[in-house]
Amino acid sequence: METTTKTSKVDELGSDETRAISPEEYRRVLSGLKLAGLSLTHCEAQADRLAAEQAFAQPNSVPVHITGEVSFETTEKAVIVNQTYKITGKQGRRRVFALSATYAVAFQSTEPFTEQFFKVFKDRTLPTFTWPYLRELVSSMTSRMGLPELVLSIWFRPTAD
């Protein structure tokens, strides 16, 4: 079984010298995708309790920074897209909390899953699968870490590390 892996920082859309995919071709490939599964494959959380007590004394005093990285693997029968999110809250130079989560989204595809398709898919379509799960995870984990519950926005476009 042959496996191919491609990795891309989320802000590299269009940085490759390959041709862009047309909207018609994108819709054709997208219509040939069938969701086969979605799972959380990695999760890590850390909190600095002392920094958190000081930082959260004032509402909305901890800026939250979210980055993302996406890769995909193709096999004879499936495409696995891995979306990693990293969320940090800092006050000044001190990190108050950090979370990271990786989701694996499996698809069956009737059309070739190309790099050109992936460049658009990772920013426009993939977050519709993974972002709701991340929102719930972040809300739950921040609360479990003894921090004020963090509710992420409905939609988000990640930046690269």
Image: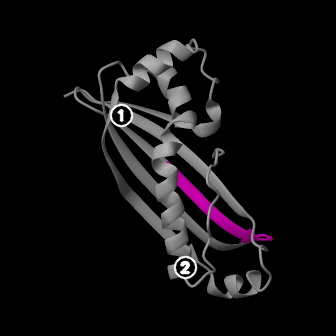
Q: Which residue is mark 2?
A: 143
At x 72%, y 69%, the residue is 90
101 or 24, which lies in front? 24
Q: Quadrant of residue 109?
A: top left
Question: Is label 1 in contact with label 2 (beta carbons under 8 Å)?
Answer: no
Q: Nearer the viewer, residue 41 or 150?
A: 150
Could you tell which of marks 1 and 2 lies nearer the N-terminus?
1
Q: Position of residue 86 (x, y in %)?
A: 57, 57
Q: Which residues are magenta?
A: 84-93
**Residue 75: % across, % down:** 26, 29
**58 relative to 22, above or below:** below
Mark 2 crowd level (few <14, some 14–19, many ≥20, 10 Å Cα): few
Left or right, residue 38 beside residue 6: left
Relative side of 76 to 83, left or right: left
State the image quarter where residue 32 is shown. Answer: top left
Three-letter amino acid code of the residue under disc 1: Glu
Q: To which residue does mark 1 refer? A: 73
Asked if 51 appears above or below 116 in the picture, the reply is below
Q: Predominant secondary structure in magenta? A: strand
Give the image location of residue 135, x and y in percent: 54, 61
